[in-house]
Amino acid sequence: MKPPRKLHIKSYGCQMNVYDAQRMVDTLAGEGFVESASVDDADLVILNTCHIREKASEKVYSELGRLRVMKEEAARQGRRMNIAVAGCVAQAEGGEIINRAPVVDVVVGPQSYHHLPELLARAEKDGRALETEFPAEDKFSFLPPPKPDVIRARGISSFVTIQEGCDKFCTFCVVPYTRGAEVSRPVSKIVDDVRRLADHGVREITLIGQNVNAYHGEGPDGRTWSLGVLLRHLAEIPGIIRLRYSTSHPRDVDEALIEAHRDVPAVMPFVHLPVQSGSDRILSAMNRKHTANDYRRAVDRFRAASQDIAFSSDFIVGFPGETEEDFQATLALVTQIGYAGAYSFKYSPRPGTPAAEMQEMVSAEVMDERLARLQELIDSQQSAFNKAAIGTTVGVLFERAARNPGQIVGRTAYLQPAHVMAPETIIGQVLPVKIESLERYSLLGELASSLPVVPAGSGAQPAINAHETRMGA
Ligand code: 5AD
Ligand code: SF4
């Protein structure tokens, strides 16, 4: 038997890239590859890239510079190290990567990575291979499911892609170009995936898509199902305790989704609902297809259905033409909504998008200053939200042993990490925890099995890393 080949994969950007990376590992397992944490002795290195902002794509070229040195070292030792660039930079700049970075053997777009085995074979034969078409076939039909031991090793929380691509064409965004038109997977395929995951220990599913609440998949009854209907159905699958979804668009919040929050306890009361700006003038220039008041109304509908609900969002500061008055409208919206956390970014022109052609650029200094003001406001809301958890008893889904011996870490309904001293047997269960303190973003508490769990929200609020990348919507 041939020894396994080592695959090192590095993902940038959004949750869908994390998910895609796992599916690439599953695909290449059939070719004798095993995933490896170390890059030096890898036979294949995949950079699964992000194109959403300039900084994200610049990282790829600097990483390729480092990999060139390693590849040369491998060659000196008589080994071949293949280097593949996948993800949205591959899709948007595939030809340029091939020209600019001779170190790259394979370039593969996000809709074609099920072809990785053939592309690698082609690269070994012809030197290099590139595929950035949107193939007619659906990659999901070709991706092998993960093996039971792989599912277990990945833990109790899993992503499942239910929808991909976007038809909204916000003027700043590359997603409609890199991920393509909006496509929803059929319900039966999603149910198969979730059942398999649940059978092998997964307890929490996050349904992902660039515009996840635009989901409109074919149901087993031949009708089109929306996200709310799908959530209700998935909650019935034995073993599934928690359901989440990301990322939503305010315009696609429909009654079925609101009702799922009202009626289905497994649907977590934490919604990522990007707004981008609080100014109608800027929202219109962004082609967001909603006003600030439409957004407020969507938030009110969620809140009316579920009192526990908390929100996070995405903001862009310094979109072309943004005045101090527009920015004030954003601050006012944040103050009014009261977020559990949010991600905020400086506008970055993306080649090929309509906004990149817009003239009135906001200066770098003004952008920096606005970003700092916005982040200060969001941080204060986030910190108040987290502090409110202290003294309450909340349900925590336990995930794994923590770094500190004897401690187990899990997450609250709002994705706050929560640590308790407990045996590992609690992993995979939701148990009530009396929260005693907050250390940076982490809650510390003790198991309170004799106390009733207060409904998910009840004052305890989320800690999220406000600077991590989110996808879409
Ligand atoms: N510049 C800055 N931020 C952007 N985002 C998307 N495109 C850009 C851009 N060109 C942000 C949006 C989106 C999140 C995933 O990334 O806030 O919701
Ligand atoms: Fe689509 Fe979201 Fe990008 Fe707008 S920001 S184009 S809704 S992915």
Image (tube, grey):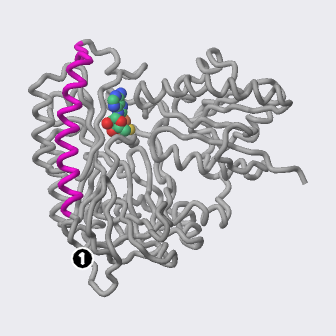
SS of the residue under disc 1: loop
Q: Could you tell me which quadrant the C terminus lies in?
A: top left
Residue at the limit of the structure toward the bottom, as seen here: 450
Residue located 31% across and 44% down the image = 466
- The kind of secondary structure the magenta stretch mainly shows is helix
Residue 301 appears at what percent x and percent y? 17, 58
Describe residue 275's horizontal placement relative to residue 357 as left or right: left
Magenta residue check for 367: yes
Residue at the limit of the structure toward the top, as seen here: 359
Residue 328 appears at what percent x and percent y? 10, 32
Q: Quadrant of residue 368?
A: top left
Q: Which residues are magenta?
A: 360-388
Describe residue 173's horizontal placement relative to residue 159 as left or right: left
Residue at the limit of the structure toward the front, as seen here: 405
Magenta residue check for 98: no
Asked whether residue 255 is in view, the answer is: yes
Q: Is residue 16 above or below residue 219?
A: above
Quickly name the residue at label 1. 454
CB at disc 1 and ligand 1 closer than 8 Å: no
Residue 134 appears at what percent x and percent y? 58, 35
Dot 1, crowdedness within 10 Å: few (<14), some or many (≥20)? Answer: some
Q: Quadrant of residue 211?
A: top left
Residue located 78% across and 45% down the image = 5
Front residue of 461/50: it is 461
Q: Quadrant of residue 152?
A: bottom right
Circle 1: residue type:
Val
Q: Is residue 281 above or below residue 137?
A: above
Q: Is residue 128 above or below residue 409?
A: above
Residue located 65% across and 59% down the image = 146
